[in-house]
Amino acid sequence: MSDWTVELEFNDGSSKKFWRARTDGSDFIVNYGRIGTDGQSKTKGMGSADKANAELEKVANQKRKKGYDDVEGSATPDAGPTVNAVPEVKNKKGKYKVKRAGQTIVVEIETDGASIETEIEETHASPEAAAASYDRIVESLLASGYKKA
């Protein structure tokens, strides 16, 4: 079994290279180069094991987005780092309310690990005011790059 947590390869025409990484305590260690060579290694002190693991996951995912594939037998894209487990994150939840000029807005927000769920409810003085607010929100979302799901 390899000492490397993540082992990736990129094969595209004449470009055949590898990238592999692991952590050792608070160090993030990579080895990369052309397939068939020993490549070169770099060690980056991250200050903590959690930061080193986060860096490993972040950089590995960037490599995958660039077309690198996992080497058979190494970590899968969903597996993430296998050493120095990240501490459990406590859920957070809040509810916020504002009233102004015939409008009430209630926002509920909750985090569960790596995801955030929000729910927003607006109450207006009339159906016409609600429709106008809806149109403004949709226009703002579309202008910001959102697409209808």
Image (spheres, rainbow, N blue to C red):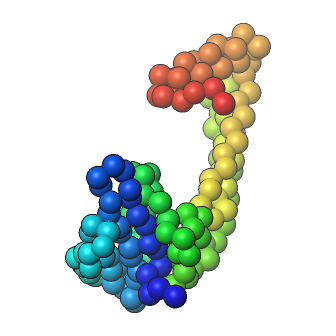
Judged left or right of residue 40, residue 91 is right
Residue sitting at the far top: 128
The answer to whether 128 is drawn above or below residue 146 in the figure is above
Which residue does the image show at 26% across and 69% down from the upper left?
33
Number of numbered labels in the structure image: 0
Q: Tell me where residue 54 appears, x and y as whole percent.
A: 44, 71
Give left or right: position of 35 versus 56: left
Percent across and percent down for residue 128 are: 72, 10
Inspect this view and state whether residue 46 appears.
no
The residue lying at 67 percent from left, 26 percent from top is 103
**Residue 5, how many percent across, how many down?**
47, 79
**Where does residue 110 sit, x and y in percent of width and height?**
67, 55
Pick the front one: 6 or 103 = 6
Q: Residue at x 47, y 28 (%)?
A: 144
Where 59 falls versus 141 (above or below)?
below
| Residue situated in front as seen by the camera: 50 or 66 | 66
- In the rendered image, which quarter is residue 99 located in? top right
Residue positioned 39% across, 88% down in the render:
24
Q: Quadrant of residue 149?
A: top right
Q: Nearer the viewer, residue 148 or 82?
A: 82
Q: Is residue 129 visible?
A: yes
Above or below 15: residue 31: below
Nearer to me, 85 or 68: 68
Which residue is situated farthest in the right direction here?
Answer: 127
Q: Kindly indicate the quadrant of the structure image that contains residue 118.
A: top right
